[in-house]
Image (cartoon, rainbow, N blue to C red):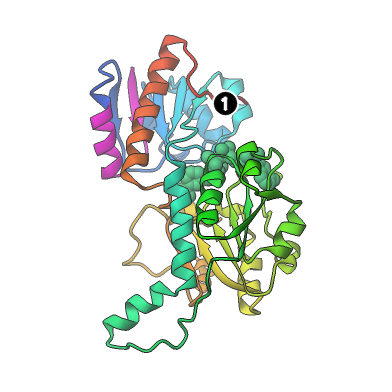
Amino acid sequence: MKVLLFSCQPYDRASFVQAGTAFPALELHFSQAPLTASNAALAKGFAAICTFVNDPLDAATLQILHAGGTQVIALRCAGFNQVDLQAAQALGISIVRVPAYSPYAVAEHAVGLILALNRRLHRAFNRTREGDFSLHGLLGFDLHGKTCGVIGTGAIGLVFARIMQGFGCHVVACDPAPSAELQALNVSYTPLPELLACSDIVSLHCPLTEDTHHLINPTRLALMKPGAMLINTGRGALVDTQALIAALKCGQLGHVGLDVYEEEASLFFADHSDLPLQDDVLARLLTFPNVIITAHQAFFTQEAISAIADTTLNNLHDWQQGLPCNQVQG
Ligand code: NAI
């Protein structure tokens, strides 16, 4: 089966070429360009395509893919909020995904953001390089004894909660499907308003759905402890970015770490450093000394990208054989 991989960076290509040796029946072709409605016709003749997290699979794009003979789309990610599942189902296109590759990768990145923000490592790094060895403005706090609120305790939130317990944090959580494992570890589940009110650090690990769009909005930000830290490694649109900026300006939020951003699709995963930044909201966020933004790199560990390639090709192999294949149900 011919497979065309969109949004394929050199590191993706390397991991897929390596994983592909175990799947000789899959003929892999690579495109660095993201998938859009205007280039979807490139997939004509490919029974399978493979896309990444910001490739929009809206009804118009799916129509073009279907007309070109695409029968299955393999997502190289866990989330599938970018897919119009109803349209895919109506066209008979199967969607398969990688439900879990390395929860450790994302959880550990969230913890990395917390440590860097708290101890101002980003500022200290620049300062010592300039010969400035002063400590003013670098005062942090002990994580030990603080309350950490985890929103979404699936695969990633579970690992994150366990790490934070290791620092001596009191972990509280909010999830419509509580984890028995975390409850056994004395993690208490509370409704969202209570979690926001008692947490020194809040970390988002739930999927983006209609219900969770702008989960963090002006009302919820006002419920948070003044000066609290917010970490988002979930999806950008879980947070109302304009409200985030307002909360940072008035000091309601003390620290913000983002690996995802609502409008990231046209910016992330590419080098725009030679061009003026056109996104004024992101530009404003980047001016705050107490904000760290990484460009959707939380998943990016050697273990995770190997697992993504292996699972994706296995999904396509199993789909061809009519076996269970991590299919997303519409
Ligand atoms: P998962 O499906 O194992 O867990 C998600 C959890 O969120 C579930 O327990 C679910 O019950 C809970 N949840 C759903 N709605 C909720 C709500 N309104 N409030 C609180 N909890 C809610 O997913 P996993 O693997 O832990 O991933 C979580 C999210 O992390 C993904 O949906 C994806 O958006 C994001 N992600 C980000 C990556 C990155 O590189 N930044 C990489 C991988 C995933």
Kindly identify which residue carries mark 1: 88
168 is higher (above) or lower (below) than 265: below
74 is higher (above) or lower (below) than 139: above
Query: Which x, y percent locates residue 245?
Result: 61, 71
Q: Which quadrant of the figure has residue 262?
A: bottom right
Residue 123 belongs to the span the image colors magenta: no
Residue that appears at 37% across and 37% down: 6
Residue that appears at 36% across and 31% down: 42
Residue 5 belongs to the span the image colors magenta: yes
Query: Which x, y percent locates residue 84?
Result: 59, 33
Give left or right: position of 232 versus 149: left
Query: Which x, y percent locates residue 291?
Result: 50, 70
Residue that appears at 76% across and 58% down: 194
Q: Which quadrant of the figure has residue 7?
A: top left
Looking at the image, can residue 81 be seen? no
Quarter of the N terminus within the rendering: top left
Task: State the extent of the magenta-drawn residues as a range.
Answer: 1-19
Going by the numbered disc 1, the residue's amino acid type is Ala
